Each structure stands twice: as structure tokens, then as C-alpha cells.
Image (cartoon, rainbow, N blue to C red):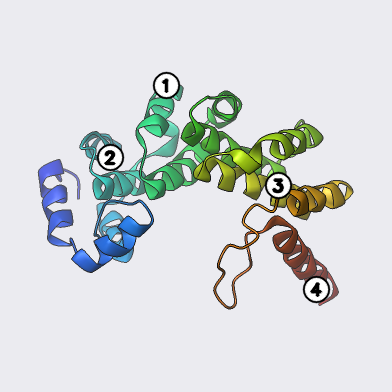
Amino acid sequence: MAGTTVAEVTAELAALEDPKARAVNERHGDDHGVNLGKLRAIAKRLKTQQELAVRLWETDDTAARLLALLICRPKAFGRDELDAMVREARAPKVHDWLVNYVVKKNPHSEELRVAWLADPDPVVASAGWALTTERVAKKPDGLDLAGLLDVVEAEMKDAPQRLQWAMNHCLAQIGIEHAGLRSRAVGIGERLEVLKDYPTSAGCTSPFAPVWIAEMVRRQDAAKTA
């Protein structure tokens, strides 16, 4: 599909606009009405096209940016490019995909993780916490886990929503993956009560950290004895 233009792609996305899908997405802060399955089908057809991805990102259209993140080459972005992109990514889904599909695969991810953790913008800081949660699970060596718990304990209760969610995920991940810190992580969750009353669908695990930790540890133990 080389040679596909931005105009052609944006026209295709516009044709897929569904008012019902937009209504659902907007409840989550995402201003687009394109079914994500159909969006992924377009990405599969286009394959990797870095230049097109960059041009689509520049449109500032949420659906176009989501598609850009699916067809880009994650390792092709420079550090400053990704820093600018995370500051521009205000739609939650765009922010989430940017961090998980692109930044995590980029050689500058660790440098950005450290910088973003200390950023005064809570949305940018949430990206730093998301990258930290990834390290807690996969590459914890060198992380000050107790120090992270100190920050969570002091700041999570009053943090803006997206930052609070990211910090809560890190809290839960520390409790799940690191038995020596589990009781402290659970205790912090119980004291702060963040997301304690969050509505959870049947069959889903509550995001309340003590419940989340207990359920994931139970699953791990069950898998070991299976």
C-alpha cells in the first residue's frame, strides 16, 4: 500500500464514523467514532509506513493518530519527538497506545520514564508511571521499589484521575510481583481507599489495589499447583 496519501486515509476514516461509537468513546474522553476493529483492519492493510504515520499524527485527529500508532516504526522516533507526542496526546486512548505500542519499544524509553516521572504535567507523569509499572513487572533491578511506594502513599490519594490510575497500577504491580513488599502495598491501598468503590463488571477484577493484588497472587499460586 505504499503511496497511500493522508487525504485517502482520513477520507476512509471519516466514512467509518459512527455516531453511536462516538457517543461511547466520548464517555471515556476519546473524541472519535471509528470502531477499533475496523481501524486495526486498515492498519493491517497499510502495514508499516513510518512517513505516513508521522503525517497522520500531524493531523491532530484522534482516529488518524490511533492509526498512526499502529503503522509506525516505534524505534524510528527520537527522544524529543516522543516527548512532544506524549504532551500532544490528550485523548486517553491515544495516550495509552502511544506509551504501550510505541514508547515501550523505543530505545529512549528508560530515559523518558525517568524524565516523565518528575514532570509537573499529571498526564505526562502518568506516562512515566506506566513505564515504571512495566519495569516493576519485567526489569525491577535498579528500581527503588520502597521509594515508589513512598511516593504513592504520599501523592496518589489527591492525584488527578489519569495519574492516580497509573500510580494505582504501579502499587498493585509491586504487590503482585514482589512478595517482600506485598503487605505494605496492600496496607497503602487499604488506607488510601483509592478506587475502592469503583464499579466492576461481573467476571472482572476490581482495580482496588488490595483486591487486585489478592486475586492476581491467587491466580499465580493456582498456576504453580496446576
The crowding category of the residue bearing disc 4, from other C-alpha atoms within 10 Å (few below 14, some 14 to 19, many at least 20), is: few
Q: State the image coordinates of residue 171 (x, y, percent, origin top left).
A: 71, 47
How far from the left and from the top, in percent, is residue 122? 51, 33
- According to the image, label 1 marks what residue? 80
According to the picture, the residue beneath numbered tag 2 turns out to be 53
Horizontal relation, residue 185 to residue 98: left or right: right
Q: Earlier in the sequence, mark 1 or mark 2?
A: 2
Question: Label 3 belongs to which residue?
Answer: 171
Q: Amino acid at mark 4?
A: Ala
Query: Is residue 40 visible in the rendered structure shown here?
Result: no
Q: Dot 1: what SS?
A: helix
Q: CA distance from mark 4 to mark 3?
A: 22 Å
Task: For mark 2, give the secondary structure.
Answer: helix
The residue lying at 74 percent from left, 51 percent from top is 189
Residue identifier under label 4: 222
Based on the displayed image, in which of its 4 quarters is residue 156 positioned? top right
Q: Is residue 22 above or below residue 132?
A: below
- Number of numbered labels in the structure image: 4
Of callouts 4 and 3, which one flags the residue occurring earlier in the amino acid sequence?
A: 3
Task: Compare marks 1 and 3 and give the one earlier in the sequence.
Answer: 1
Q: Nearer the viewer, mark 4 or mark 3?
A: 3
Q: CA distance from mark 4 to mark 2?
A: 43 Å
Q: Secondary structure at mark 4?
A: helix
Answer yes or no: do the residues labelled 1 and 3 have beta carbons within 8 Å?
A: no
Residue 209, picture quadrant = bottom right
- The reply to whether callout 4 and callout 2 are in contact (CB within 8 Å) is no
